[in-house]
Image (cartoon, rainbow, N blue to C red):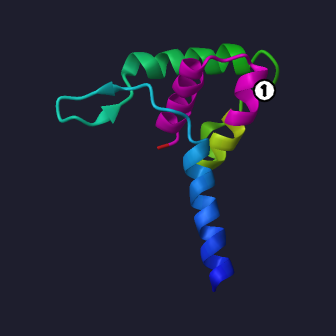
């Protein structure tokens, strides 16, 4: 039982630490959301930067947690800034809903 709790705790910490930092706008209600401009920018970056080297994956082919790992692996190869990384992730997740 202790091993199961330790494994679950480790997984939760790993997911939180690997999630891209939010660079989002704040709504009147005080919640953070991506702007439509940022999502559109993410789509453009996704198509141009990712599509330059390989066929574009279907955003629905992976869940949001899987996309964190994929994005963390691919963003440095595509030389994306932190903001660009976040915008692409936000775009993929917005299409994946």
Give the quadrant of residue 34. Answer: top left
Q: Is residue 11 above or below residue 47?
A: below
Q: Residue at x 27, y 37 (%)?
A: 31
54 vs 31, nearest the viewer: 31
The kind of secondary structure element at disc 1 is: loop
Q: Position of residue 74 (x, y in %)?
A: 74, 29
Q: Position of residue 91 (x, y in %)?
A: 51, 29
Q: Is residue 63 visible?
A: no
Q: Position of residue 81 (x, y in %)?
A: 62, 17
Q: Position of residue 54 (x, y in %)?
A: 81, 24
From the viewer's perspective, tell me whether residue 59 is left or right of residue 94: right
26 vs 9, nearest the viewer: 9
32 vs 37, nearest the viewer: 32
Callout 1 crowding tier (Cα within 10 Å): few <14, some 14–19, many ≥20: few
Q: Is residue 55 visible?
A: yes
Q: Residue furthest bottom?
A: 1
Q: Residue furthest left?
A: 28
According to the image, label 1 marks what residue? 55
Q: Is residue 79 magenta?
A: yes
Q: Is residue 68 above or below residue 74?
A: below
Q: Residue at x 63, y 52 (%)?
A: 14
Quadrant for the N terminus in the image: bottom right
Count the marks: how many?
1
Predominant SS along the magenta part: helix
From the viewer's perspective, tell me whether residue 55 is left or right of residue 45: right
* Region rendered in magenta: 72-96
Q: Is residue 89 magenta?
A: yes
């Amino acid at each position: 039982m202790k091993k199961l709790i330790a494994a679950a705790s480790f997984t939760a910490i790993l997911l939180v630490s690997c999630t891209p930092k939010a660079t989002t706008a704040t709504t009147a209600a005080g919640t953070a959301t991506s702007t439509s401009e940022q999502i559109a920018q993410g789509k453009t970056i996704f198509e141009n930067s990712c599509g330059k080297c390989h066929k574009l994956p279907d955003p629905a082919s992976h869940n949001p947690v899987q996309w964190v790992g994929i994005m963390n692996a691919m963003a440095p190869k595509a030389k994306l800034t932190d903001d660009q990384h976040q915008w692409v992730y936000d775009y993929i997740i917005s299409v994946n809903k």
